[in-house]
Image: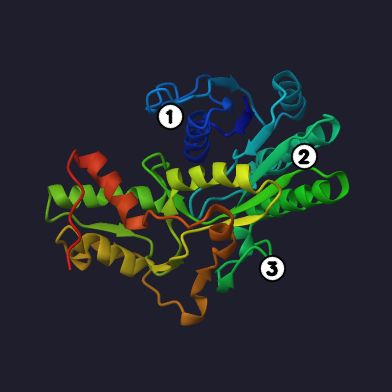
Amino acid sequence: MTRSLVLGAGGQDGSYLAEHLARRGHEVVGVGRSAGPGPFAPVNLAVPANSPVGAYRYRCLDVGDGPALRALLEQEAPDRVFHFAAVHGAAGFSYEPVWGQALAVNTGALHTVLEYARQSGRPVGVVYASSSKVLGAPLRGTLNEDSPRRATCLYTITKLAAEELLRQYRARHGVAGSILTLFNHESPRRPQDFLFARLARELALCLADPAHVFTVRTLDFYCDWGAAEEYMDLVCELAERAPGEDVLLASGVTWHGREFVRELFARYGLDAKAHVREAEPVSIPAAEFFQADITRLARLVGSGPRLSAHSVLEAMVAELTGGARPEVRA
């Protein structure tokens, strides 16, 4: 049985990843800072009858503590390590006050994992979750695995440093490491300070009160949104089929924020203009449009993501209202 270590198992991505790995028969060790496994721990998996399901154990640990993480790696002796822990905030988050923590978790922890893989004397696969933010701000043009990287904030500095570490260990020491460049991906497990989660809450309020109005900073942006749960299943598939490959993970569909919200509200028979206000309604140039090229992803796993961002948000609204998803209206 493959033993997989998931760093950041208490978060949106790590919890879905742990679930999918366990369903695939892995023995999963989830690692997080919380004292307990949290509300998303895969302890009661719904699986087909007679399906071989792996075990799940949770370990409380600050992955930014290098010696403690190294001791855990030596104790658990994983076959694969998925680094999905991160100090990360919503748009506008200030990383200056948490720089040391961000560097230790986003970068230092990966170095600890890579050193373990180098010295273990056996094959250890490493998968690192990077971010589309390393491709620039704003994103522009067609973007793929070979697009230039550049730092735009302290967060991206930690991610770029981690990417270079992994490339170094892959080239010099033969570590089977993969860099996954993830574009925005959402779910009901997304923290409430993110825009996607707020849109779900506000839409639920609009459905309950036709006079409800809310304000966001702006909807004048382009975004590629996908489903976190589906993306984590694809992460498992990539780890099995293409160890050591760098892959861009996106939907391949680019939305303008206003158009996305307009269509979302229309699916419920609502006019977004009657409910949504923008505090900073600017108009960005067409040159800031971007397109994520998912050719490599589709080649490696047979297809790209299938779930739309609207379907994800509708599921979140249904969870909040206890209602069914709407029928798409023409």
Q: Position of residue 137 (x, y in %)?
A: 58, 67
Q: Is residue 170 above or below residue 304?
A: above
Q: Amino acid at mark 2?
A: His
Closest to the observer, 310 or 207: 310
Q: Which residue is mark 3?
A: 148
State the separation of the CA atoms marked 3 and 2.
23 Å
Report the quarter where the N terminus lies.
top right
Q: Position of residue 175 (x, y in %)?
A: 79, 42
Report the quarter where the C terminus lies.
bottom left
Left or right: 289 in relation to 108: left
Asked if the residue at tag 2 contacts the one at tag 3, i.e. Cβ–Cβ closer than 8 Å, the answer is no
- Neighbourhood count class around disc 1 (C-alpha, 10 Å): few under 14, some 14–19, many 20 upward: some
Q: Position of residue 117 (x, y in %)?
A: 79, 34
Q: Is residue 215 above or below residue 193?
A: below
Q: Amino acid at mark 1?
A: Phe
| Disc nearer the start of the sequence (3/1) | 1
Q: Which residue is mark 2?
A: 111
Residue 40: numbered disc = 1
Q: Residue at x 68, y 61 (%)?
A: 151
Which quarter of the picture shows residue 177? top right
Q: Secondary structure at mark 1?
A: loop
Left or right: 315 in relation to 64: left
Furthest residue toward front: 50
State the separation of the CA atoms marked 2 and 1.
27 Å
Closest to the observer, 269 or 273: 269
- Neighbourhood count class around disc 2 (C-alpha, 10 Å): few under 14, some 14–19, many 20 upward: some
Q: Is residue 300 above or below residue 84?
A: below
